[in-house]
């Protein structure tokens, strides 16, 4: 059943049940348990490099916006986002807001920007940390990585009568072939930070991990979290996600991991207009209950 129909049906069911519960002796206790799906996207934007020729941001910006509009995610974890790109996206899609600092603690470099639909979610609080031995030190690096790497996170509450809370973490692991050790340490640190930040709340982890499913970094995460693509009973699109603007992907490095959610559908979107793709990565989308 399409996501829009699922959501409308759930809301109609809740409205009817609430009308009955309002006349009960204890309406609060009579409030029904409602399962509304949350649609999550992870999307490496590809920073606005002047060296991308026909794939510079100005020429693919419209395709990028169209891809998000077609998918209609409730929350998006992005990587390589520059502030100017974030401004372009919310200007075209004003129903979204986004937050996050760049990897050096300001707004002039790459962000792990988290976007969310303001009509569906309320941002309760947010923060970030660095993938290093000193995670609270802005711009810190470690484990021989050549760039600062961060995790951006936010606690959200659904804007429905159930008012359920969950936490989204968004990250981008080190990218070089020789960075296996940094990716493994990053995966362990991400898991260590779940409890202090999320407690027992449901968790979504989005990111470009620069690690394939046969890597140790992937297995560190997958041993504790659920890979939505693997767990979803319905999958659409190719499993591979990095295609370098060719449309033919050869690596699976973009993921949505979860805790406390049930993945019901996962899609790797390959939207394009002629030869123009939104990014050099395909976005991954998951519907979670």
Image (cartoon, rainbow, N blue to C red):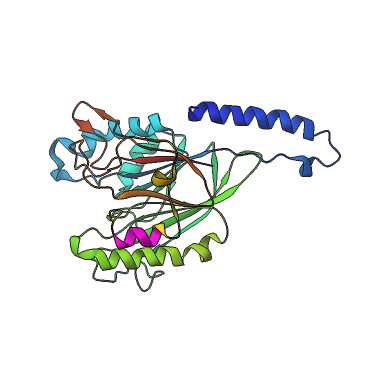
Residue 34, horizontal then vertical, whole percent: 64, 39
The magenta region covers 215-221
Residue sitting at x 39%, y 69%: 135
Relative to 221, say whether 244 is above or below.
above
Residue at (46, 65) in percent of width and height: 193
Above or below, comparing residue 64 to residue 153 in the picture = above
The quadrant where residue 231 appears: top left
Q: Nearer the viewer, residue 276 or 48?
A: 276
Residue sitting at 52 percent across and 64 percent down? 195
| Magenta stretch contains residue 219 | yes
Task: Out of 5 and 219, give the one closest to the viewer.
Answer: 219
Q: Position of residue 10 (x, y in %)?
A: 61, 31
Labels in figure, total: 0
Q: Position of residue 145 (x, y in %)?
A: 24, 66
Is 243 located above or below residue 207 in the figure?
above
Give residue 150's quadrant in the image: bottom left
Q: Specify whether residue 149 is in view.
A: no
Q: Does 71 appear in magenta?
A: no
* Quadrant in which the C terminus is drawn: top right
Q: Is residue 36 visible?
A: yes
Indicate left or right for 9 with 148 as reference. Answer: right
In the rendering, at what x and y percent does residue 242 appear?
A: 24, 45
């Amino acid at each position: 059943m399409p996501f829009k129909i699922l959501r409308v049906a759930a809301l109609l069911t809740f409205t009817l049940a609430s009308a009955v519960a309002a006349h009960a002796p204890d309406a609060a206790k009579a409030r029904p348990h409602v399962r509304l799906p949350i649609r999550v996207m992870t999307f490496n934007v590809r920073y606005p490099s002047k060296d991308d020729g026909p794939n510079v941001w100005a020429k693919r910006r419209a395709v990028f916006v169209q891809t998000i509009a077609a998918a209609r995610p409730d929350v998006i974890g992005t990587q390589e986002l520059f502030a100017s790109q974030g401004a372009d996206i919310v200007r075209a899609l004003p129903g979204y807001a986004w937050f996050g600092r760049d990897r050096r603690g300001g707004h002039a470099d790459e962000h792990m920007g988290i976007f969310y639909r303001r009509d569906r979610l309320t941002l309760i609080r947010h923060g970030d940390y660095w993938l290093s031995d000193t995670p609270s030190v802005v711009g810190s690096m470690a484990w021989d990585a050549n760039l600062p790497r961060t995790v951006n996170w936010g606690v959200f509450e659904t804007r429905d009568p159930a008012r359920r809370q969950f936490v989204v973490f968004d990250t981008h692991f080190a990218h070089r072939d020789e960075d296996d050790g940094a990716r493994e340490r990053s995966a362990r640190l991400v898991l260590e930070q779940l409890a202090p930040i999320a407690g027992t709340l449901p968790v979504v982890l989005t990111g470009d991990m620069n690690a394939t499913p046969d890597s140790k970094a992937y297995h560190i995460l997958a041993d504790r979290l659920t890979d939505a693509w693997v767990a979803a009973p319905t999958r659409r699109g190719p499993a591979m996600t990095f295609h370098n603007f060719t449309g033919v992907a050869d690596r699976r490095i973009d993921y949505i991991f979860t805790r406390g959610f049930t993945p019901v559908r996962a899609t790797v979107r390959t939207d394009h207009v002629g030869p123009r793709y939104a990014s050099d990565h395909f976005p991954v989308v998951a519907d979670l209950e």
